[in-house]
Amino acid sequence: MGGTLTQLVFDGVADGPVGVALDIVGAAARIARAGLVALPKGRQAPRHRLVSMDGKPVRTATKRVLEVDGALSPRTLDSDDVLVLPGLGMATPPAITAALERPDIVRGVESVARAAAKGVRVAASCSATFVLGAAGVLDGQQATTTWWLGSTFTQRFPRVTLRTDRMVVESGDVLTAGSAFAHSDLLLALLARRVSPSLAHMVARYLVLDERASQSHYMVLEHLRSADPVVRQLESFVTSNLARQVTVHDMARATATSPRTLARRVGSALGTTPQHFAQRLRIAQAVHLLETTRRSVDEVAAQVGYADPAAFRRVFRRETGETPRARRTRAALRASPTR
């Protein structure tokens, strides 16, 4: 990688991704210095800088003060460098909209565009992928983002081909990664492409990181609950009626709203429809049953409201990226003491 890996952070940045990036870059440097991996000629482990837009400390999502090494200056970046944005710590579509209107992030969008125009490789994970989208560097490219914000991303950036099934997507000189802890996957991908695949693999082993290609296995794990009371009421109603299919009118009555109002509230809070949200909740319960009971797939299907097992299998595969049987087998292997 030869150059510097510069992490750009804003107020509200997710704490975990910043720390894991420091660990990965630090481990790479130690492994390279120890000669545990033979790096290709002319390659070396990256240097690391942590910057903000004005050079002042930022407050993380947990309100901790995060010191930085200085201010971002696109003029000092060149084609050997990588500009990386960890997640913004914002989990809902309204929070993303508000963040992209903040003056510091507006300036960050402009800086990302200038850096990319100079040939600097740019990368982002989780909600920070929206900054790359706003900068225009993803237009006409493939990208990924955290899976529950996928529909919001597509609506905002229709010129980007979104692949929420992928953990990391490389398109030209831009890399994007999925949810917050996919920042580790993003850093490992940068190490592999810019320094050495062997070094990236050694770092992953050293830090006991799971090298994953897909977000799909994690999609049924619902993200942080919405603060919208209508969404909470809807979730309670659906989970209390998992054994039967419920209509939009049923859900509207249960939440004392009209179908149109319910669709607007769920779309605003979760970026999806009431029907799809209910489907996710049923599939989440199905995953739990497959992993914790010995019930057959057909029995699980019936318990979560699918009279047609074939339809259940199709929906399950679409939502999780694997078959019910594969999910059960993977869970059993993970729990095996001999693995």
Image (cartoon, rainbow, N blue to C red):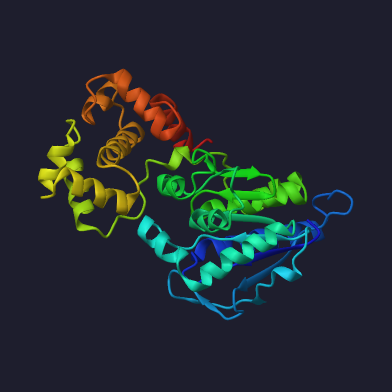
- x and y, in percent, of residue 196 in the image: 77, 47
The residue lying toward the viewer, choosing from 300 and 148, is 148
- x and y, in percent, of residue 191 in the image: 71, 51
Is residue 166 among the parts visible in the rendering? yes
Looking at the image, residue 169 lies above or below residue 286: below
Q: Residue at x 19, y 53 (%)?
A: 230
Q: Left or right: 147 with respect to 299? A: right
Q: Residue at x 41, y 60 (%)?
A: 97
- x and y, in percent, of residue 130 in the image: 51, 55
Quarter of the image for the N terminus: give it.
Answer: bottom right
Q: Left or right: 259 with respect to 202? A: left
The residue lying toward the viewer, choosing from 234 and 303, is 234
Q: Residue at x 28, y 21 (%)?
A: 298
Q: Residue at x 72, y 57 (%)?
A: 28
Q: Left or right: 27 with respect to 65? A: right
Q: Left or right: 294 with respect to 237? A: right
Is residue 11 among the parts visible in the rendering? no
Residue with the most extreme bottom position: 56
- Determine which quarter of the picture holds residue 251: top left
- x and y, in percent, of residue 275 in the image: 26, 37
Quarter of the image for the C terminus: give it.
Answer: top right
Looking at the image, residue 190 lies above or below residue 293: below
Numbered-mark total: 0
